[in-house]
Image: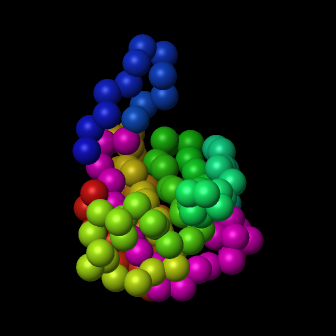
Amino acid sequence: MKISAQPGAPTRPERGWSALVPRRPRRASVHRLLMQEGYQLAFWLPAFREPCLPAQYHYRDATGTEVIWLAGPDPVLREQDPSTPAHRSRFWVYANRRDPRRADEIRERLRRAWGVLWKPT
């Protein structure tokens, strides 16, 4: 994935991965792990009942690597592909070309914490 930035806009990610999580981690656990790894909460979107959308948390580190956590099942993914495995939450990681290793490091850290398997987006 390549997203071009507008002049003056932050550098955008070059590559991305997603992972379905079989259980829903506690918000405090996700936040603590990401903060320990140098990520800051950039913004979050609350859950909506209609349509049913779980809360989203968007984190970014100093290099521009991004982690997005969907704190519940992804209803859009299930709609697009009914054969999608059952899951309780979802992560995305987007690498930034300034330091692509950071994406590898946080993907490994999330894998160890919640047993997620990553797929390129």
Residue shown at 34% from the left, 82% from the top:
85
Q: Foreground residue, 21 or 2?
A: 21
- Find the magenta span and give its range: 13-32
**Placement of the C terminus among the 4 image quadrants:** bottom left
Residue shown at 65% from the left, 50% from the top:
45
Q: Image quadrant of residue 1? A: top left
Residue shown at 61% from the left, 57% from the top:
50
Where is residue 62 drawn, in percent x and y? 56, 42
Where is residue 104 drawn, in percent x and y? 37, 63
The answer to whether residue 64 is above or below residue 56 is: above
Where is residue 5 drawn, in percent x and y? 38, 24
Instruction: Work out whether residue 75 can be spotted.
Output: yes
Marker count (numbered):
0
Residue shown at 48% from the left, 16% from the top:
8
Instruction: Work out whether residue 59 can be spotted.
Output: no
Where is residue 27 drawn, in percent x and y? 69, 70
Q: Foreground residue, 47 or 95?
A: 47
Q: Foreground residue, 68 or 103?
A: 68
Single out the residue that lies furthest toward the front: 50
- Whether residue 88 sits left or right of residue 33 in the image: it is left
Single out the residue that lies furthest toward the right: 28
